[in-house]
Image (cartoon, rainbow, N blue to C red):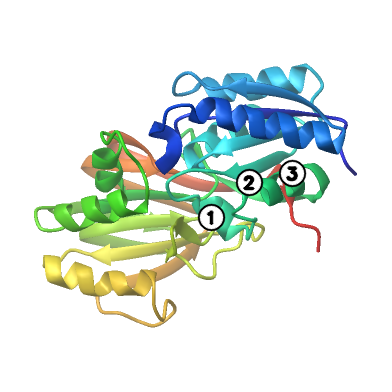
């Protein structure tokens, strides 16, 4: 059913184009034109700081919006979802971030126009939600190298896939794998790990697939564990993100779980690309079918 009133929360600086002059006005004008043409009333809001999208989503729900759309990257989508949990309003996504991993994993259109049409005219489904302690993630959470790259990437004024690849390649030569204890369901692992990733959906973004069999509706998280090793060894392992993704590779292990605990003296971690630091223990879990989401019909 097409809604009559939607909320649209726009991150004006997300993605490669976010640094361009006039981009905020361009995004607002696009939404206004498309929703008016569709006969839908749109409550258009602009984010102003980290965490603002969650508050705006809650306001949209309180004002009676039947669907709330996140126009931004995975971080914006994450924050909007935080504001929608416990409500009947489904999440729509118009991807315009640096990676857009969740939108790609859901096979949503990459064009703004078609993605907005899905948000307005698509079907409502439900998806699992992951947590690292009390931090929500919809797509991917990680501890180790990917979080360290995200930490560096956050300092860039310009965004996009090329910058992320550049930061990854430069960091791999100096990155030191740290010692972690991992309890993953009934499995135990200990040692220096380059990366411990938890995937609710398959893809980091930009074609880099962490867990090709991850399913947002199965009540499980797919886990990728990469051992420590030489920089060249890590680069060689990384091919499995792009080619022959289900094949075995030395130093890579895949598991599936509902819960996990990672313990370490110093941990750099992320949820949907938003980085934080921790020590002690991080508890990871999945809540099945906790969030309503708009997906392509059929």
Dot 1 lies on which element?
Answer: loop
What whole-number distance in Å separates the C-alpha atoms at marks 1 and 2?
24 Å
> What is the quadrant of the C terminus in the image?
bottom right
User: Could you tell whether 129 is left or right of 191 in the image?
Assistant: right
Q: Position of residue 245 (x, y in %)?
A: 42, 76
Q: Nearer the viewer, residue 121 or 60?
A: 121
> Which residue was labeled with disc 2?
112
> Which residue was labeled with disc 1?
200
Of circles 1 and 2, which is in front?
A: 2
User: Could you tell whether 223 is left or right of 172 in the image?
Assistant: right
Dot 2 lies on which element?
Answer: helix
What whole-number distance in Å separates the C-alpha atoms at marks 1 and 3?
21 Å
> Which residue was labeled with disc 3?
119
Q: Nearer the viewer, residue 125 or 188?
A: 125
Taking the view exactly as shown, the residue that stands out farthest to the right is 1
Q: Is residue 267 above or below residue 11?
A: below
> What is the quadrant of the N terminus in the image?
top right
Of circles 1 and 3, which is in front?
A: 3
Q: Position of residue 244 (x, y in %)?
A: 41, 81
Q: Residue at x 62, y 52 (%)?
A: 111
Q: Badges 1 and 3: C-beta atoms under 8 Å apart?
A: no
Q: Badges 1 and 2: C-beta atoms under 8 Å apart?
A: no
Q: Residue at x 56, y 25 (%)?
A: 25
**Other residues around mark 2 within 10 Å, as few (<14) / some (14–19) / many (≥20):** some
Q: Is residue 22 above or below residue 78?
A: above
């Amino acid at each position: 059913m097409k809604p009559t009133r939607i909320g649209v929360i726009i991150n004006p600086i997300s993605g490669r184009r976010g640094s361009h002059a006039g981009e905020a006005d361009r995004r607002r004008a696009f939404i206004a034109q498309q929703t008016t043409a569709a006969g839908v009333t749109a409550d258009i809001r602009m984010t102003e700081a980290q965490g603002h999208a969650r508050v705006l989503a809650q306001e949209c729900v309180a004002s009676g919006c039947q669907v709330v759309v996140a126009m931004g990257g995975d971080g914006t989508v994450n924050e909007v979802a935080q504001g929608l949990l416990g409500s009947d309003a489904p999440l729509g996504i118009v991807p315009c971030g640096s990676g857009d991993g969740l939108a790609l994993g859901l096979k949503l259109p990459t064009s703004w126009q078609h993605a907005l049409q899905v948000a307005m005219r698509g079907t409502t489904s439900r998806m699992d939600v992951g947590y690292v302690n009390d931090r929500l993630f919809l797509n991917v959470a990680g501890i180790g190298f990917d979080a360290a790259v995200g930490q560096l990437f956050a300092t860039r004024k310009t965004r996009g896939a090329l910058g992320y690849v550049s930061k990854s390649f430069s960091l791999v030569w100096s990155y030191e794998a740290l010692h972690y204890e991992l309890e993953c369901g009934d499995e135990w692992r200990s040692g220096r790990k380059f990366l411990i990733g938890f995937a609710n959906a398959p893809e980091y973004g930009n074609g880099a697939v962490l867990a090709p069999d991850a399913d947002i509706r199965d009540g499980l998280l797919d886990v990728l564990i990469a051992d420590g090793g030489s920089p060249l060894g890590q680069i060689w392992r990384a091919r499995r993100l792009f080619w022959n993704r289900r094949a075995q590779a030395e130093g890579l292990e895949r598991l599936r779980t509902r819960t996990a605990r990672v313990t370490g003296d110093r941990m750099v971690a992320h949820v949907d690309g938003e980085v934080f630091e921790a020590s002690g223990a991080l508890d990871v879990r999945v809540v099945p079918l906790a969030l309503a989401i708009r997906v392509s019909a059929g």
